Amino acid sequence: MPTRNPFRPSFGVSPRVLAGRGGLIDDFDLALDEGPGSPMRSVLVSGARGIGKTVVLGELEDRARSHGWLVLRLPEGPRLVTELEETVLPSLLTEHDPEAVQRRVTGGGLSPLGSVSTEVTERFPITESLTRMLARLAGIVGRRGAGLLLTLDEVQAAPPDDLARLASAYQHLVRDDEEVALAAAGLPIGIDALLEQPGTTFLRRAERIHLEPLSDDQVAEAAVATVRDAGRVISPEAVQELVRIAHGYPYLLQLVGYHAWRAAGRDEVITLADVRGTLPVVVERMGRLVHAPALRGVPPGQRAYLQAMAQDDGPSSTGQIAERLGVTKGNQNMQRTRLIDRELIVPAGHGLVDFALPYLREHLRATST
């Protein structure tokens, strides 16, 4: 009897069965063969939290490695360029540059002119730039018949100036026909901010891919395949309930499947009751890991708008929201637009809005007091 749980509800961990993203992965794989100039070598992936951006990056990295490419995961957060210049790139160059050791020995003064070389180096130290080190690394792997893939997750967490410097360095590599590719992922608001920076104009020509929720059929097929490959069966009714709870989100597909598998114990068949019982933990986990971070930094006026929406069991009337908040129609429209830009709400028909993220309504109700 199988016991190992095949579902993997950890953010960024590739599932055993990848649902709905095969076309994107295959297009990138083909671009690696097409050579410099292929449009799919520069990819910007956006989407809501839990939609599978990090998993897609991981799959792109795996495809690059299968071609023999070197994958460089760029540091996330506020020290992007600093860590690249001071730690990451020097370490990679030391590892991959066959002349690195020879240059260090020569610079140590072993030759008859060593003392002169040492004196000049000390008086006029040369600090390698991001562009120069990336170019040297790309050249090294290129001479081996491979390429260099740069990947960056959580684009919105990087300083705009660092992103501009990175884009400029990458542009130099592309213009020099180096075997390079770039795949970056982030929330839509982060990708938009990146492309608005003066120094990132070049990236506006990158392929912009917005990940949408999976279709019901894609969720169902992935759930059935995952369970079947692990030696069990999931009933048709349980599949339908899993689809309903998951709302097309790859993370929720894994989360519901994981807890339903556990609930089934040693039974061969995962039942409707096993899946239905996962709902409380799904709502709690989404609230803690997805909604709380998504709401962090949302201004009070927009939070109030969301709380007003949470009073409804379905789509909310914008006119009724304005009445509840005691604001003008213009103020309501402004808050609505900003929340749509944050991808927290979506238009749901004429004069109607709804929550964009599954179970955000339940989270707001639970945290309103």
Image (cartoon, helix red, strand yellow):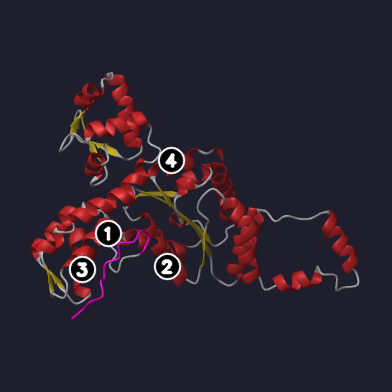
> Residue placed at 25% from the left, 44% from the top?
363
Three-letter residue code for mark 2: Asp
Mark 3–mark 4 CB contact (< 8 Å) = no
Q: Earlier in the sequence, mark 1 or mark 2?
A: 1
Residue 18 in the magenta stretch? The answer is: no
Q: How many marks?
A: 4
Q: Is residue 316 left or right of residue 331?
A: left
In this orientation, does residue 29 appear?
yes
Label 4 secondary element: helix
Q: Position of residue 60 (x, y in %)?
A: 41, 62
Which is nearer the N-term, disc 4 or disc 2?
A: 2
**Apparent side of residue 323 relative to residue 54 in the rendered image (left or right):** left
Residue on which the image places disc 3? 262
What distance separates the C-alpha of mark 1 from that of mark 4?
A: 24 Å
Dot 1 or dot 4, earlier in sequence: 1
Check disc 4 and report the residue beneath it. 192
The residue tagged 1 is 20
Secondary structure at numbered mark 2? helix
